[in-house]
Amino acid sequence: MSEKKIPYTESKLYRIRHSATHVMAEAVLEFFPEAKLAIGPPIADGYYYDFDLGKNENGKPITFSDEDLEKIEARMKKLLKKNAKFIQSSMSIAEAEQFFADEPYKLELIADLAAGRLDENGEPTAEAVTEVSIYTQHEFVDLCRGPHVGFTKQVRANAVKLLRTSGAYWRGDENRPQLQRIYGTAWENKEELAAYLERLEEAKKRDHRRVGKELDLFSSSPEVGSGLTLWHPKGGLIRHLAEEFCKNEHITHGYDLVYSPHIGRSTLWETSGHLTWYKDDMYSAIKIDEDEYYLKPMNCPFHIMIYKNKMHSYRDLPLRMAEWGTVYRYERSGVLHGLMRVRGFTQDDAHLFCRKDQMPEEIDRALNFCLHILRSFGMNKFHAYLSTRDEKKSAGDKERWHEPTEALRDALERANLEYDIDEGGAAFYGPKIDLKMIDALGREWQLSTIQFDFNLPERFDMTYIGQDGEPHRPYMIHRALLGSMERFMGVLIEHYAGAFPLWLSPVQVEMIPIADRHTPYADKIAEQLREAGLRVDVDSSSERMNKKIRNAQLQKTPYMLVVGDREKENNEIAVRTRENKNMGAMSVDAFKERALAIIADKGLNL
Ligand SMILES: [Zn+2]
Ligand SMILES: [Zn+2]
């Protein structure tokens, strides 16, 4: 169990950032007195504030320029140094409506607060209020429940920075007005700010969209459609290697591999309930003959149909059905992001069907298998989340939830994983574990899920015949390890900044002949290495040697084998790595042995 840490919302940084965003809004109003205020919450690593700046003469929303941002930041720093007090007060709903009469967005927020729909930050709330909380610094007054620092000076002027602007729809709804958002960051001191800005820079360099282009791994095209990925030869090879490894591991770990179609009849999705509770995330029906078919958003109903194809006895269980199933889900175009958020993706999906007495062991197995697979990709730091029952969503089901929830918790404890509990965070159909990978920059990426489902076995009336000769309901567990192959590849790219482990590198060795006359020798060695199973390219271009080395390093090719007169004469190669380490001359056999051993171990060091 992880040690108790203060939630972000109660931390000093949260108060610093919340206060910074108020002072930023104050500065904005000095330059744009007509701006209407929307919301300005702290977020991870910073804060933003949304403004409506009105429209220009062409009817387009007025936006912030880079110069505006500089001016606002400079003014914000001056205001911080003035050391105004953050003063809390309250207003009745009527008073607040009068005070914010010129602020249409604040009026909407006040109405939502009064009705107990949404809070000041636009998050759902169930609490209807009769009074609203107000914060004031200098002349700036905001509808706000805090918390803030005491005085503006407690936000250090040299530890704040405005980062960028973007358009954002009010309430995230493209039918509502487009607002202008300013993102900023604030830290306790200037050293922390500098470290953060460095991390941002590093993250930019690792951005999978950028690296994907530089290494020619994948693309998407408006002609194909948003959120649909094209895998290029090198990206396709990495994906193939990852999938091949995982599929074989599944087979040796007691899974059955199955395949199912991309579309299914509406009757299937009616039985599964998807057409009732998931329709907004599905694409429109396709008419075939007299029936309607849907692109699958999930693989589960197909695996259930495989299960139901015959009678099962208690002796058949557990069953573990795995499929690299490509699913399609509707995502708003505004949230699509590289490989991380797409409309078509392939899950490494599996469904476990087991008896009650087998359930704890199945959970243990699933979690350990998951860790084994992720570690094979060099991912070693994790943060787990256990989502438990929500009183409201699954009323009257307390008994049924207890054991599976405890089984998940026990498995986390036994695996010695750090985890947090998301109390009431589970879907209505069962508790789950989410496993996030912590990458080289300390960022968390959601990958694996182990999810109980009490709903689908009921809906499909799944049974097995028990030892007592009576029909029983099996437990059903959904689990995905890498999650989606698209997203996983994105994470892999960002984690390694494109410098993949040797076993996954599309080109493992670049042969670099120093002059044209060395090319036949380079070709001969390439052939020997290929016969041993290594992926080798020969750079026979007319570039200078240093340029060839540089090019291979830019492509993150693990090894460069330089060959010239001396190497040829001694029947050797000069080995360099992508980190520019010169390993000196080596016999071909010694190199081969070394590389193959690293590949077999899935080693990270060259
Ligand atoms: Zn506030
Ligand atoms: Zn499923």
Image (tube, rainbow, N blue to C red):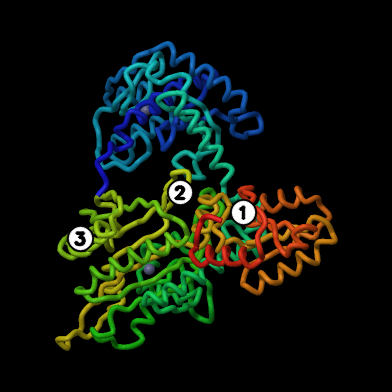
Q: Amino acid at mark 1?
A: Gly
Q: Amino acid at mark 2?
A: Asp
Q: Position of residue 328 (x, y in %)?
A: 50, 65
* Residue with the mark numbered 1: 212
Which of the two labelled residues, at mark 2 and mark 3, occupies the earlier sequence position?
3
* Residue with the mark numbered 3: 406
Q: Amino acid at mark 3?
A: Glu
- Element on which disc 2 rests: loop
Which of the two labelled residues, at mark 1 and mark 3, occupies the earlier sequence position?
1
Question: Residue 439 shows which numbered tag?
Answer: 2
Q: Position of residue 336 (x, y in %)?
A: 53, 52
Disc 3: CA contacts within 10 A as few (<14), some (14-19) or many (>=20): some
Q: Quadrant of the C terminus?
A: bottom right
- Depicted 92 relative to depicted 318: above or below: above
Residue 101 makes an appearance in the image: no
Q: Residue at x 25, y 59 (%)?
A: 414
Residue occupying the far top of the picture? 82
- Depicted 241 relative to depicted 562: above or below: below
Task: Choose mark 2 or mark 1, whichever is in front.
Answer: 2
- Mark 2 and mark 3: Cα distance apart in space: 29 Å
- Mark 2 and mark 1: Cα distance apart in space: 18 Å
Which of the two labelled residues, at mark 2 and mark 1, occupies the earlier sequence position?
1
User: Is ligand 2 within 8 Å of the beta carbon of the residue shown at mark 3?
Assistant: no
Disc 1: CA contacts within 10 A as few (<14), some (14-19) or many (>=20): many
Q: Position of residue 218 (x, y in %)?
A: 62, 59
Residue 181 makes an appearance in the image: yes
Residue occupying the far front of the picture? 570
- Depicted 510 relative to depicted 199: above or below: below
- Element on which disc 3 rests: helix
Q: Nearer the viewer, residue 190 or 400?
A: 190
Question: Residue 324 shows which numbered tag?
Answer: none
Disc 2: CA contacts within 10 A as few (<14), some (14-19) or many (>=20): some
